[in-house]
Amino acid sequence: MLVALSKVAHFVKVLIQSASSRYQKLSLVGKALIWFILFFYFCSTVFILVVTPARIAQFTYDFAQDIRHLPYGYAILIVLMIAVSFPPFIGHTTLLNLFGFTYGLPGFFPAAFASLAGSAIVFVTLRIMFSKRLRLWTSTNEKWQALEVVIRSRGIPLIILIRVSSFPPWAWSNSLFASIAPVSLFQFFIATLFILPKVMVYVFVGSRIARLSDGEQRNHMDTQTKIVNSLLVVGGVAISVLASSLVYHLMQKEIKRLHDSPSESDELAAEALEATEEAPLLGSNSLSSP
């Protein structure tokens, strides 16, 4: 038991150190964005406590049911999903929950379609808009050239590993892959298919939250049913967090393996993966005019 706790504490410590290191490397705008997000969540928490979770939950449930009864209500959520797939927007996970919250488990199908369609649209759009500038930028960046060589040689397994990792976030991950010339649309689409289990988990969590949000359904539940639904929500979130942590650990292991490789290309590729915020379509100054 103590050994397990020690490993967890070590993992948390490494995660905090990694987050701190990434934060220090961010530009002033990036750091300001992080603080804005934290401030937003703080204000949201205060709002929830003041208004009360029960009233907010009931209002949200009623609104979701209004969307559900629209003839093409799911199309609204799909359009929103496509929109938040473009950087710098956020909200992919929240929308996955909303699909489940609104449509229950059948919401997985429009959620999966929206995720796949949104990422593909972003990939193609950015490739078309910035193809010339990307080629110009890549020709002058040794690390990025090395990353492209490594991805070309390792192929789809490495692409999948990077894709299912939680870092960078969804919209920025779409932009990252659009920046890597050797990654084809077909490879990107296949790699994106591997995020569907995560989509299913978030939709499932949203469907369970919906049952607990509606006062009428909640009043007809006995205590045991409420506890089971609550545990399913917590369990779904825990599974998602653990899976994301595992993939992140594997990603860091792969980066370390590249660092330890005698190949200079592998070493430079590892440095490029560690500094994804410097990617052509992620950095604020990366795509300067030719």
Image: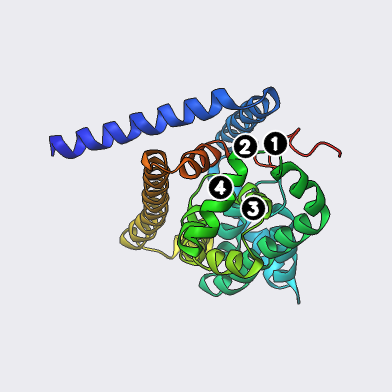
Q: Which residue is mark 4?
A: 147
Mark 2 and mark 3 lie on one chain; the one further toward the N terminus is 3
Quadrant including the N terminus: top left
Q: Amino acid at mark 1?
A: Gly
Q: Nearer the viewer, residue 87 or 126?
A: 126
Q: Closer to the observer: label 4 or label 1?
A: 4
Q: Which mark is residue 180?
A: 3
Give the mark, 3 or 1, whose residue is nearer the N terminus. 3
Label whose residue precedes the other's in the sequence (4 or 1): 4
Residue located 20% across and 33% down the image? 6
Residue 207 seen anywhere in this rendered image of the structure: no
Q: Residue at position x 70%, y 53% from top?
A: 84
Q: Image quadrant of residue 110?
A: bottom right
Q: Is residue 129 left or right of residue 86?
A: right
The amino acid on which the numbered mark 4 sits, given as a three-letter code, is Leu
What's the CA distance linking mark 4 and mark 3? Answer: 8 Å
Q: Could you tell me how far apart the alpha carbons at marks 4 and 1 are, in whole angstroms?
A: 17 Å
**CB-based contact (under 8 Å), mark 2 and mark 1:** yes
Which numbered disc, 4 or 2, marks the residue that appears first in the sequence? Answer: 4
The residue that appears at 57% across and 26% down in the rendered structure is 25
Q: Secondary structure at mark 3?
A: loop
Alpha carbon distance from label 2 to label 3? 13 Å
